[in-house]
Image: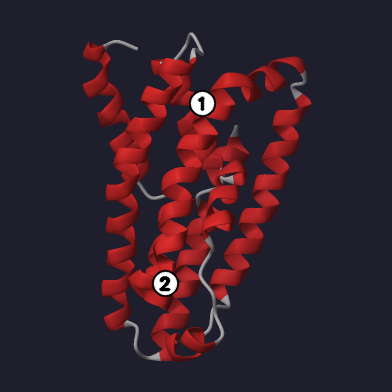
Amino acid sequence: MTPENLPALLLFALVSVMTPGPNNLMLMTSGANFGLRRTVPHMLGIGLGFPMMIILVGLGVMQLFDLWPQSYLLLKIASVVYMIYLAWKIAHAAPPQEAEATGKPLTFVQAAAFQWVNPKAWSMGLSAITLYAAGHDLGAMLWVAAAFAICGVLSTSVWTIAGQQVRRVLRAPRRLRAFNWAMAALLVASLLPVLIH
């Protein structure tokens, strides 16, 4: 990793984390259902969990895929099953008044662990490592992880606040239900690139 590559890495990280995907759709849904304050642990779980995943994947997990290619297929199956489960939970989320009392946004640990079954996170992480840390040395991994951590602060904030703003329009339970079903459908649709490859 050289200083000349840093602007390209930051641009790659920013575009990767800002585009719609499972994390962003779930943050928007959480912002709409629970508000910004209650979604902060979820935001931090993504913001710190994904960079940690990049480091661990770059330093060793990629070798597991090389040694045992079936492990990648097992990861893909587990990811799809878990994403469909999350889509079902989003589609059946309670209206805001009920959500305040009974619903819970993802915790820090749940959001950080989710990165390991998030197909977009795997795609972004493997691409970033291949492009910007091909030597798999710790220094390069830390640069890549730091770029995603910095860009992740912006992305998680924007998507959660967007959801919070949408919440004003979704005061009617019928509208919120429609929004949650739409977000669930988009979450399932985000699996299509994984299923095609």
- The answer to which image quadrant residue 34 occupies is bottom left
- The answer to which image quadrant residue 41 occupies is bottom left
Vertical arrangement, residue 43 with respect to residue 170, above or below: above
Left or right relative to 143: residue 70: right
Vertical arrangement, residue 22 with respect to residue 4, above or below: below
Q: Which residue does the numbered mark 2 point to in the structure image?
A: 38
Query: Which class describes the residues within 10 Å of circle 1: few (<14), some (14-19), or many (20+)?
Result: some
Q: Secondary structure at mark 2?
A: helix
Residue 29 or residue 192, whichever sits in front: 29
Q: Which label belongs to residue 145?
A: none
**Amino acid type at image mark 2:** Arg
- CB contact under 8 Å: marks 1 and 2: no
Residue 193 or residue 91, whichever sits in front: 91
Q: Which residue does the numbered mark 1 point to in the structure image?
A: 126
Q: Residue at x 74, y 22 (%)?
A: 69
- Spot occupied by residue 47 in the image (x, y as percentages of width and height): 41, 47
